Amino acid sequence: MSNVLEQPLSILESSPETAADFPAWFRDRQAAAWSRFQDTPAPTRRDETWRFSSIKQLDFSGYSTAIEVPEDTGSLIERSQGLESRSARFIFVNDTLIEIESKLPEAVICLPLAEALLTHGDLVKEHFMQQETRLGSAKWAALHEAQLTNGLFVHVPDNVEVEGTIEVYHWIAGEKSAVFPHTLIVTGANAKVRVIDYFKSENEEDAGLCLAFNDLYAGPGSKLDYLAIQAVNENSKVLSINETGVARDATAKSFVLNVGASWARNESLSRLDGEGSRSDMLSVSIPARTQEYDQRTFQHHVSPGAYSDLLYKNTLYDKARTIFSGLIFVDEGAHRTDAYQTCRNLFMSSDAEANSMPGLEINADDVKCSHGSTSSQIADEEIFYLQARGIDPVRARQLIARGFSVEVIERLEDEKVEALVLGFVDEKFARIATGGA
Amino acid sequence: MSLVITDLHAQLEDGTEILKGVSLEIPAGEVHAIMGPNGSGKSTLSKVIAGHEGYEVTSGTVTLDGEDILEMGIDERSRAGVFLAFQYPAEVPGVSNANFIRAALQARLPEGQELDAVAYYKELYAKMDLLEMDRKFTGRAVNEGFSGGEKKRNEILQMMMLDPSYCILDETDSGLDIDALKIVAKGVNAMRSESRGMLLITHYQRLLDYIKPDHVHVMAEGRIVKSGGADLALELEANGYDFLKEAATA
């Protein structure tokens, strides 16, 4: 009898095992992605897209996809409570689907990716990871593509408006467990949908890794809202890549909340493909203790007459660290572009560090663009005012910090969704108040 | 029962003395007014009583029904029953007015006891109606984008909701047109009671046409230099503060 435990193979060493019944094109894509992953050099801090990053966080060896799903999935289903009025809910644990419920109209395709590959292979193929990852994580996007086994595929046909919200839970369970959640949303002309991805840990201790990818295609005149709630435990890492294409007269809104993880990196790219298109890129991050959030964004104005507006807010406690690097890029001929980019940092501690690198590159005429970054602390007069109303200084600072985030959250323009997000924000503040993160 | 200020001296961080021995007693049930030229220390007095950290009290006492409040933190003084209506209220982005006032009321409840939300909103709306404030002010961020008059009304709203035992109103009339002034005065007069003391700080007599004080004090160069009845305000209005110069040169 051997007492050597068998170590599951690391995600960096195990070549992809595409499921036998998946289409051939997908198998080819995964094999090609695996080669690309292996051939692509790891980033260094000298790369512009990794400036100020903690490159050591990119050591993903030791994480594995072979960690078993816990036997008691009932409690995870129990804990997957979001909005009261959802139109569908999908719950994954370690990328394994454990629960589906759906009240969606029949015309809407909303399926686990593993199923969609079998039933709507061509439709998936048309949209699956079509863009080049350009914000630094090409290597990790390749790893994601090679290793992914499931996710969610949503296709809302022309003129269909989905009432309520599609909620997707991605639980990570087990020490050194790696997950590769993939969300692909396609809206037809004048369609409407909202999807929320939740990233959470089964317990507070096990160090997990989440390499997530979400790909959004807003068809002409459609309205696509996407929220990512990152609330994994404090020992886990998250790298998420978002790519959004916005067609003529379409509106895409993406929102990222960062409250969990020891380290999280978000890359978000919005491509304004059509006249009259609009993209709102929103984020709220509240890092504490030694948490680090690294965000890179790209507002790509391909078409003339499009609008993009980015607002990222960071509230930094303790020795937290944030990095924001954003670029507005206006293509030649993309006249009458309206593009805005703002990153604001609120320091709740003098030991925190925020790095901001706003950027602008304009190759067209007649554009309205602005970009800026500010850092501030809570003004003494504000605290005095709240205290003069009997509110103790700790609570006063918390209220003001919450208000700082509320200004972004209000842009979700849906009371119930705003309340949901605020629930996570309040939970975070409560943890901070008791010395946690 | 009274708010008693005795020989109060206070200075700025740089050592400049602003209050040079202020003594004043405001018994419950009375309305006092302090008038005086700009720079006389009127607003400083209100901030020192509220506990503003920009001033250092070098000597003297302030007691609330016998209790020394200078030893208390800013928020404790408020909970003990002192209310300062600010001349320039701070803006608090992202915090709705309703949530702000609710937090202030919640802070007065014992640990573990939750404010009754239904009763709270009922009371809030009743007071807002009295102050002719639109309901939309409950959802708007505290003072953000409010006009001068809206901010002052909002101060009075908070005062009414928190029901303090002593109210200090710092230049509440400044920036108000006559209609707004009447509404604010209505709110303040509604709060006059046997159990509450009030101190109005004002540069002009105008406010006192609408809120009639029991006593008027004149402050100059950090001291109360003259006290009298409501008539004193009229006298000042007619003759200005020139008598102060005469007194100084005499």
Image (tube, coloured by chain):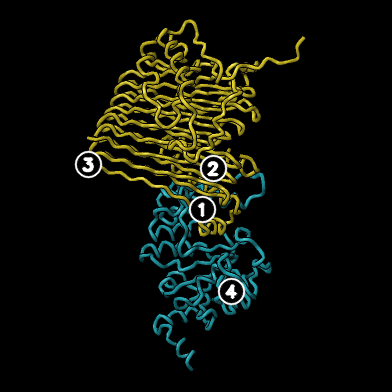
| Label 3 or label 1, whichever comes before in sequence order | 3
- Please determine whether, in this image, residue A231 is positioned above or below residue B224: above
Q: Quadrant of the C terminus of chain A?
A: top right
Residue A93 seen in the figure:
no
Mark 1 = which residue? Answer: A377
Q: Which of A345 and B41 lies nearest the eye of the viewer?
A: A345
Amino acid found under the numbered disc labelled 4 = Ala
4 vs 1, front mark: 1
User: Which chain corresponds to the colour cyan?
Assistant: B
- Please determine whether, in this image, residue B248 is positioned above or below residue A252: below
- Please determine whether, in this image, residue A89 is positioned above or below residue B199: above
Instruction: Mark 2: give few (<14), some (14-19) or many (20+) Cα within 10 Å.
Output: many
The disc label shown at residue A365, or none:
3
| CA distance separating discs 3 and 2 | 37 Å
Mark 4 belongs to chain? B
The disc label shown at residue A321, or none:
2
**Circle 3: element type:** loop
Instruction: Mark 3: give few (<14), some (14-19) or many (20+) Cα within 10 Å.
Output: some
**Circle 1: element type:** strand
Outermost residue toward the top in this view: A21
2 vs 4, front mark: 2
Mark 3 belongs to chain? A
Mark 4 = which residue? Answer: B10
| CA distance separating discs 3 and 1 | 38 Å
Q: Residue at x 65, y 63 (%)?
A: B72
Amino acid found under the numbered disc labelled 3 = Asp
